[in-house]
Amino acid sequence: MRERNWFSVDVLVYPKPDPVRVYRLAMFERYDAVCDTWPSRTREALKAIANEGRAIVVGKPGWTRFTPDEIERIVESVWRLGSQMDAARELGVSLSRVQRGVQASGRGPAPRLSARERGRSGALSRHGKEQSPCA
């Protein structure tokens, strides 16, 4: 049998607040308003409930949603340019976003540039799109 914390009788008497309501109140009001609304709960318990509400409203942390069009643009750009970094520069997104987009497409590993091509690409990006002075 599970032990109960008899010091928190209020937790057993009062129903659990709606996580979405707690989250929205925490986002649009000061956090003290959340504590004032549910004085029977500890601050830590309310934070945990607010995190549950955030997961419901926003989505689970770390999950990135892609539209099918966005995945197609990322994959097309990566395969055309041959580099995830160049595709990120062209699309104006972060490298990690491009990597996650390629992974979400399920098309296997992305093409990679050779060391020489990577050096030339880096030199071109540092000196604008004109010919590199090192080439």
Image: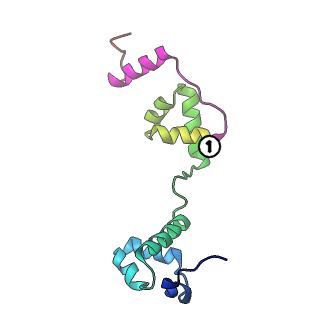
Residue with the mark numbered 1: 104
Q: Residue furthest bottom?
A: 13
Q: Quadrant of the C terminus?
A: top left
Q: Is residue 124 above or below residue 3?
A: above
Q: Quadrant of residue 16?
A: bottom right
Front-lying residue, 92 or 52: 52
Q: Residue furthest top?
A: 135
Q: Is residue 134 above or below residue 23?
A: above
Q: Quadrant of residue 78?
A: top right
Q: Is residue 36 above or below residue 78?
A: below
**Residue 105 on the magenta span:** yes
- Mark 1, residues whose alpha carbon is within 10 Å: few (<14), some, or many (≥20)? some
Magenta-highlighted residues: 104-127
Q: Is residue 86 above or below residue 66?
A: above
Q: Position of residue 61 (x, y in %)?
A: 51, 56
Q: Residue at x 55, y 59 (%)?
A: 60
Q: Position of residue 37 (x, y in %)?
A: 41, 85
Q: Residue at x 51, y 31 (%)?
A: 84
Front-lying residue, 97 or 124: 97
Q: Quadrant of residue 28?
A: bottom left
Determine whether, in the image, residue 75 is placed left or right of residue 31: right
